[in-house]
Amino acid sequence: MAVLLGAGAGAYAFGATPSSPPPVKKTLHVESAPIERGTLTGTTKSTGTLAYAGARDIASGVGGVITSLPAPGTQIALGQPLFAVDNVPVFLFHGDLPAWRAFEEGMPNGPDVVQLERSLAALGYFSREPDDEFTARTAEAIGAWQKATGQEKTGVIDLGRVVFSIGDVRVAAAKATVGSQLGPGSPVLGVTALDKKVDVDLKLADQQLATVGGKVTIDLPSGKSTDGTIASVGVPTEKESGAGKTVVIPVVVALSDPSSVGPLQQASVTVNFPSEARENVLSVPVGALQALDGNRFGVEIVDPRSGKTARVPVTTGLFAGGRVEITGPGIEEGQKVVVPGS
């Protein structure tokens, strides 16, 4: 819409002389946006916490004096030492089961032997197919690993000298201090996995929105957003809140792009769960809506040839993502609508 200002009789205002220049014509600029057709998806927002996954404590399997500890933030990989007791390192191996016995020839078969051999194979010391039987080949692989890591070559691993973990770990905190005396089972390190996740407590009334594999978006403190996938959905759990006890559904969200959160270690975030969806509908920015009276809304359509505008009543539908679904006589895809203040 173009409005011409300052024309006509205003050219010679009071006090002007014939030599005064005529006033400049000004145009009022109006922003517009097209009516778009597509899918409009509503969202339900819930506050969550971004943090490292798999937080847990690692305890010592042997008693003695702590002689070495890693600094918080240290990442420890397969085959590397976690800490040292009596100046003997305790190493990280991969596996689901905790160690519960020493590894030595003559021991009964078991799944812990499979874990041990898989770790030794990944480190390049065991060349056979890992199985649950401890053989002379297993002892040889242990000896080669011990020699390479500066240990006494015995072919035996005493209980407590390796710790099994599902994967590599990150040190979150020290639970003991160098020089402290501890017994078997005493916590030494607080660790996490290397990846981050989002924990969110969903309202009981919104539990239908959380399904494993479902896609969500996450609003970060920086103002940017990233995508995530629902990794697990817990059972209804009672939790304390400012208003008393409430029942929530614990949901864990895995990040689609872990690098998108940058160096954030822990932060409050907003998780957007898709709810209602409308397909193949016409929509405009919410700012394009104009109140015609107390009960009706309309939009201002821009004529592409003359630039003139006309208000047209519309019926609103779903509001989502800053847009609103509209229908009405003469409303078509591609038409331009006035968006004041855009």
Image (spheres, grey):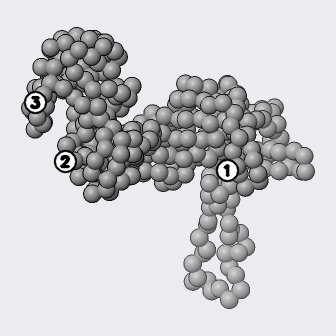
Residue type pointed to by label 1? Val
312 vs 187, left or right, is right
Residue 169 at x, y percent in the picture: 34, 39
Residue type pointed to by label 2? Asn
Q: CA distance from mark 3 to mark 2?
A: 16 Å
Residue type pointed to by label 3? Lys
Tag 1 or tag 3, which sits nearer the N-term? 3
Identify the disc placed on residue 153: 3
Q: Residue at x 69, y 33 (%)?
A: 236
Q: Residues within 10 Å of mark 2 (few under 14, many from 20)?
A: few
Identify the disc placed on residue 339: 1
Find residue 27 and report its image quarter.
Answer: bottom right
Q: Is residue 219 above or below residue 163?
A: below
Of the pair 197 and 315, the residue shown nearer to us:
197
Tag 2 or tag 1, which sits nearer the N-term? 2
Q: Residue at x 47, y 51 (%)?
A: 266
User: Is disc 1 in contact with disc 2, using a CB cutoff of under 8 Å?
Assistant: no
Q: Secondary structure at mark 1?
A: loop
